[in-house]
Amino acid sequence: MTTSATPPRATIIHGYGATPADHWFGWLAARLAEAGWASVVPALPEPDSPDPGRWLTATAAAVGTPGAGDLVVGHSLGCLTVLRHLAALPGDWRLGRLVLVAGFVDPLPALPGLDPYVAGAVAGLARIASRTGEVTVLRSDADAYVPAGHTDRLAHLLGVPVRVVPGAGHFLAEEGVTTLPAAL
């Protein structure tokens, strides 16, 4: 009897004001699918008025308990949501790779309306890093929404260097970012 191997899963979590069809999400999902990944970009509820509980529930449903071969990608507010999900997971889970694009864990001066969502520390970042095979943190040198220092601090808390993608802004389609090879 032969059993078919389950393909590794790739879950891409969008950020504030976005949908699965926006920016580089579909491009990345398609490239990963071509490489044999079961890729999904779930739609988080009410992206223009994110509720932390509802976003966390949707993220938990999409990511679940990851496997050692799985990949999770977050963008902007999606990074914070992914980190909160992973931090809350019990047991001895493993994640193959975590990619955080324009991530942060501190309030954003440019978007004070998100302060209630951002409020409260994310406990367990070192635990997340220790249970993840590879963590990549990407930022631009020209992000109008997330200060470079915010993403640099997140990378430091995770114990990894930050990778800078020159001129990528906040990694939005309207800034010309419809592909993101650095996330591959």
Image (spheres, rainbow, N blue to C red):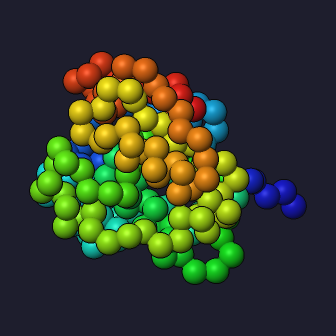
Expressed as whole percent of the image width and height from the top left, the position of residue 151 reads 42, 45
Residue 172's place in the image compared with 129, above or below, is: above
> Which residue is found at the position 61% from the left and 53% from the top?
159
Left/right of residue 75 with respect to residue 30 in the rendered view:
left
In the rendered image, the residue lying farthest to the right is 1
Quarter placement of the C terminus: top right
In the image, 149 versus 140, the foreground residue is 149
Where residue 84 sits in the image (x, y, percent)? 42, 67
Give whichever of 112, 53 is nearer the camera.
112
Across and down, in percent, residue 156 comes to: 54, 51
Q: Is residue 177 above or below residue 29?
A: above
Q: Residue at x 64, y 80 (%)?
A: 91
Residue at (62, 59) in percent of width and height:
129
Q: Is residue 174 above or below residue 44?
A: above
Q: Is residue 155 visible?
A: yes
Query: Residue 127 appears at what percent x and percent y?
Result: 61, 68
Relative to residue 164, is residue 78 drawn left or right? Answer: left
- Left or right of 132 on screen, residue 63: left
